[in-house]
Image: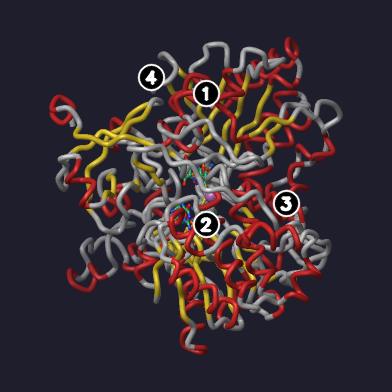
Amino acid sequence: MAPFANRPAILHVVLGRPFPSIKQEEVRLTEPVYIKGCCPLDCQDTCSWVAKVEDGRVTSVRGAKEHPITRGVLCAKVNDYEARTYAADRLLYPLRRTGPKGSGRFERISWDEAIGVIADRFGEVHHEYGGEALLPHRYLGSMGIVQRRALMRIFHALNSSKFHGSICGASGNALEAEGFPRGFEPELISENKLIVLWGCNILTTCHHQWQFINEAKKRNGARIVAIDPIRTRTAAACDQHIALLPGTDAVLAAAMAHVILRDGMADLEFAREVASDFDDFVTEVEAWAPARAEAVCGVSSETIEALAREFALVRPALLRVGVGPQQSVHGETFFRTVSALSILCGKWRDPGGGLFSETNPVLDEGRAESPHLRTGSQRSLDIARLGETLTDPDLSPPIRAMMVWNVNPAVVQPDVARVLSGLAREDLFTVVLEHFMTDTARFADIVLPSTTQLEHFDIVGAWGHHFVSANNPAIPPVGEAKSHGEVMRLLAAALGLEGPEFEESDEEIAASTLPPGMDIGELKAKGWIKSPPPAPSFDAKVKISANIVAPDRPDGLFQLLTPKSHYFLNSSFVNQYRQRRAQGAPSIDMHPADATARGLEQDDLARIWNEQGDLQALVNISEAVRPGIVSVAGKWWGAEEHGGAVANLLSPSRWSPEGQPAYNEIFVEVDLAAAGQIAAE
Ligand SMILES: Nc1nc2c(c(=O)[nH]1)N[C@H]1C(S)=C(S)[C@@H](COP(=O)(O)OP(=O)(O)OC[C@H]3O[C@@H](n4cnc5c(=O)[nH]c(N)nc54)[C@H](O)[C@@H]3O)O[C@H]1N2
Ligand SMILES: Nc1nc2c(c(=O)[nH]1)N[C@H]1C(S)=C(S)[C@@H](COP(=O)(O)OP(=O)(O)OC[C@H]3O[C@@H](n4cnc5c(=O)[nH]c(N)nc54)[C@H](O)[C@@H]3O)O[C@H]1N2
Ligand code: SF4
Ligand SMILES: [Mo]
């Protein structure tokens, strides 16, 4: 590194030549280099960025100005992504556990030793119990194709168990598989005259889409309506906020359909053509007159009537559906019924109209995993039931070795206590690839340091637009961190796996997923290339009637919602100083009337508990939630360092029929934490 790397160039102007014996050219800072990359995180916007590198160090990361969606802006989470790369608590070397599982006691070891131990243990487990006793667990910490998929080559070749399902939006996935379209070119959102944000906190979770909403307002005078139990920053920015009770969306949509059919406002031709069970749907919604729905949803029948009329008559109109309301045992009923509403009114006839929840560029991502390497076992387990899988005494064979990357199961899975008792099993060998010592990594036998997005090559798809994005490395790996492609190659060699799949470079792995005609060289140079957006279509008839019921709400308990926080990306960034300071301490939003009834005041430390467990958070008295509803935003962790309040200690082992964890169907008691507990804080 240059001797004066951190010294601002201006110093020479102010101080003249500080070291006369050194020639001016020798002390001059090298010119900054700008590298095109992209954000790897699980967010619909998949922004492209430009990393500024000065003297071998990334000094800033800024949104790419020319990118049609990023438009020069990142977000409150990622604005200083380089701080993640250079964080003092970053994992930089392989570690081996020296204390009990979960204790966080580790010693530094070499990569050779780490890979050797993993290969030996995987080999032993494979020999003794068969490939099915091995389990790869990964989710969306990085959406990069290499970071997410390359390691699967090893597990396919070993015929391991694998996961299916989702811990995010299993309901929408299942309905898409049935034939419901759920997205199109997001740029078309600006065509609308009415946009209903149905359980979707856009200004926090994918704020670049707000640009299209703004354009719709400017160009078409569009009206924007939020349907959300919480007055989020998005709901507050809308023309109207309908604060329904959680889990009652299907009833609200059915009541709207009731009004639309009653008053002859439906597009019967479109609905009959698209739905396989139109008459059943008509019978079903007949039972949901607005007055009956009012009692269930907590929304006045006048509001329901007016929204129904407006949605039926205004064209184009869009339902922009989020993930929050899918995270319920009624997830599929919710998605089916709001989709039915868009079909009933023929909203899909207009470009930009209909329903939007997600959309993807054309990429054959699965190819990066080389699934053809699998010759034997196809045992597939539900990702949303990790706790059950690890603790099931009847699972045959049981899971004996697990590799975990891009996921923090000790925080994000339902019923975390059960997950932790699985991770604590002495007969389970666990490897975790991470940036930081998360609650999950603490339970590992071996921890491997992963590169951050500034240190490796990757390609990222998206789930909110159609750009394929390249991530060129800005700097070499920090410490001894390695990309997951490199870990795959090292481990494959140690396991004696042979074949071209285990020798491909990260770039080759990524390139194998590109659609015909998209060139990797061009992608790297340009930074992003748009793949052709699909036109939404109904290829087969879909079933629109659902078994709509009023949700159960136990008397006297609060319903706890666990939405996304503004400064964290799920559990990522909780340990980073700037984001944590901006987010504040873990807090529980509570209506003034509820707080008074429990004798709670602003900033009191509350205990939030149910039969599964308890956690503590500061009371935030707020009219943003309605009485009976409380909310803890953010996937907190790291109890010792960051005051972790892991909401999933309270989430039940309950799923929708398609397997979506019911993260927003948690019922709790809230009271003042005991004095001793306050003192301990
Ligand atoms: N800042 C930030 N951005 C993120 C993330 C993050 O953690 N932080 N996570 C990313 C991920 S993985 C995802 S899946 C997306 C999610 O994006 P969103 O779906 O927009 O986010 P959520 O907060 O899960 O849920 C949206 C809203 O649903 C509401 N909600 C909860 N229950 C109900 C209900 O029964 N009915 C209705 N109508 N509304 C309900 C919540 O109050 C919340 O405001 O965001 C992505 N972007
Ligand atoms: N109660 C409740 N539970 C939830 C949710 C909720 O709203 N409420 N949301 C659910 C949803 S929608 C989702 S999608 C899941 C998300 O679950 P996860 O995918 O587990 O969430 P993240 O915290 O985004 O990422 C996991 C880990 O990836 C690491 N990571 C981040 N960036 C990188 C990278 O570039 N490379 C590598 N190697 N690692 C990286 C982080 O340090 C983090 O520990 O959680 C689900 N759980
Ligand atoms: S988290 Fe989303 S909004 Fe923020 S930089 Fe990444 S892709 Fe863009
Ligand atoms: Mo998600």
Mark 2, residue position: 249
User: Circles 3 and 4: CB distance less than 8 Å?
Assistant: no
Q: Crowding near pointer 2: few (<14 within 10 Å), some, many (20+)?
A: many
Q: Are marks 2 and 1 in contact (CB under 8 Å)?
A: no
Task: Name the kind of residue labelled 2 in the image.
Answer: Asp
Under 8 Å from ligand 1: the CB of mark 2?
Answer: yes
Residue at position x 43%, y 38% from top? 666
Tally of marks:
4
Say which element carries label 4: loop
The reply to whether residue 64 is in sight is no
Left or right, 259 with reference to 424: right
Q: Which residue is mark 1?
A: 446
Left/right of residue 195 with respect to residue 375 in the rendered view: left
The answer to whether mark 4 is within 8 Å of ligand 2 is no
Residue found at x 51% / y 21%? 423
Give the quarter of the image for residue 294. Answer: bottom left
Q: Which residue is mark 3?
A: 365
Residue topped by disc 4: 103
Label 2, label 1: how many angstroms apart (C-alpha)?
Answer: 45 Å
Q: Amino acid at mark 1?
A: Ile
Q: Nearer the viewer, mark 3 or mark 1?
A: 3
In the picture, the disc for residue 259 is: none
